[in-house]
Amino acid sequence: MPNPAFRLEGAKSNRGQTRINISLILAAAFLLLLAVSAFSGKLPYAVLDLYLIASAVAFAAYALDKSAAKNNQWRIKESTLHLFALACGWPGALAAQRLLRHKSKKLSFQIVFWVTALLNCSTLGWLFLSPDAGALRSFLGMA
């Protein structure tokens, strides 16, 4: 006989499903924008590679932490998870939060997560748009 608690935990509301979809679309759209920028020569492939690798590492860290939480084992520090997000892994971290349902409801964590994502995107925007970043763009081989 199926466990009723499992059914309740596994059930998703329309609002929760919408939040998952929007989050996954946001992460995928950001990575797609980076890919288009790299393929058009406006961004070095190394930047795209950095985001893809950092996102995979962040997703894996969330998965390990979720598993550890379920098994009452050693956990990854929240500050480490935030560092992965800040260091270009926020798309993978966001996907993990929604797909694994891990760290997605703790408001204090979410506030810091979104600040790290905004800082990361702001830095990337500065690199693209600021006249002051010209030397760094040249060093990175950006057009």
Image (spheres, grey):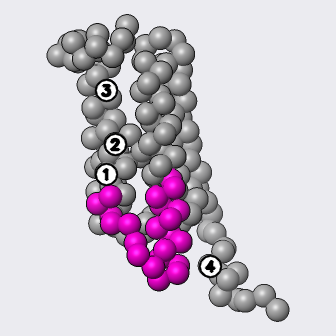
Numbered circle sitting on residue 83:
1
Question: Looking at the picture, which amino acid does disc 1 mark?
Answer: Leu
Answer with left or right where residue 12 lies relative to residue 1: left
- Say which residue appears at 28% left-offset and 33% top-offset: 122
CA gap, disc 3 and disc 4: 39 Å
Check disc 2: other Cα within 10 Å, few if <14, some if 14-19, many if 20+.
some
The N terminus - image quarter:
bottom right
Regarding residue 126, the answer to whether it shows in the image is yes
Question: Looking at the picture, which amino acid does disc 2 mark?
Answer: Ala
Q: Position of residue 56 (x, y in %)?
A: 52, 46
Q: Nearer the viewer, mark 3 or mark 1?
A: 1
Residue behind mark 2 = 87
Residue behind mark 4 = 9
Check disc 3: other Cα within 10 Å, few if <14, some if 14-19, many if 20+.
few
Residue toward you, 124 or 22: 124
What is the residue that sits farthest to the top in this orientation? 143
**Residue extent of the magenta highlight:** 59-80
